Amino acid sequence: MEGLLGLQDSPDFVVTYGRLNIEDRLLMKTLLIDHGKKLKAVRLSEGMTQIEFSHVLGIGLGTIKNYGAGIRGVGLVILDRVTNHPKFSKYTLWLMTNSTAPEYG
């Protein structure tokens, strides 16, 4: 069943999320894919190509494409890289909570 979810017991996943039951894994996968769509929205809002976005963040182009297409979920390391980058920090609240604060841009 884990193979169908795309959430193998990789060391990165276990360290980041611990061992989860099947319902929690489904929820986590949904959240990670939603973050991929959000990263695509951030990139488009900034008028950047996938290549430019990958270079600015130091992330492989294939990885960026996989996030945007929902093929791969976004991990905490990548979210941390995006939210701590000066160009993208204004999106932190939205990326992490799905809320916005117009007074901050």
Image (tube, helix red, strand yellow):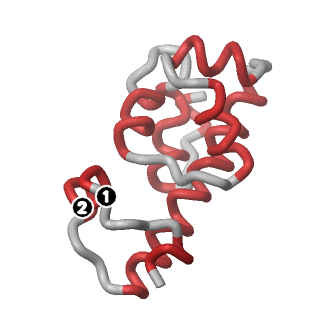
Give left or right: position of 39 versus 85.
right
Residue drawn at 28 percent across, 50 percent down = 12
Q: Is residue 81 above or below residue 5?
A: above
Can you give x and y, in whole percent of width and height, for residue 78 in the image?
43, 36
Q: Is residue 31 above or below residue 59?
A: below
Tag 1 secondary structure: loop
Picture quarter containing residue 41? Answer: top right
Q: Amino acid at mark 1?
A: Ser
Can you give x and y, in whole percent of width and height, for residue 5 in the image?
53, 74
For the residues bearing labels 1 and 2, Cβ distance under 8 angstroms = yes
Residue 41 is marked as none
Tag 2 secondary structure: helix
Cα gap from disc 1 to disc 2, whole angstroms: 6 Å
Q: Is residue 55 above or below residue 95?
A: above
Q: Residues within 10 Å of mark 1 (few under 14, many from 20)?
A: few
Q: Amino acid at mark 2?
A: Val
| In this rendering, the label closer to the viewer, 1 or 2 | 1
Question: How many numbered marks does the figure carry?
Answer: 2
Q: Residues within 10 Å of mark 2 (few under 14, many from 20)?
A: few
Please name the residue that numbered disc 1 is placed on. Answer: 10
Q: Nearer the viewer, residue 13 or 85?
A: 13
Residue drawn at 62 percent across, 39 percent down = 39
Can you give x and y, in whole percent of width and height, for residue 53 in the image?
64, 20
Please name the residue that numbered disc 2 is placed on. Answer: 14
Give left or right: position of 34 versus 92.
right
Q: Nearer the viewer, residue 65 or 88?
A: 65
Q: Nearer the viewer, residue 33 or 100?
A: 33
Name the quadrant of the C terminus. Answer: top right
Residue drawn at 73 percent across, 24 percent down = 50
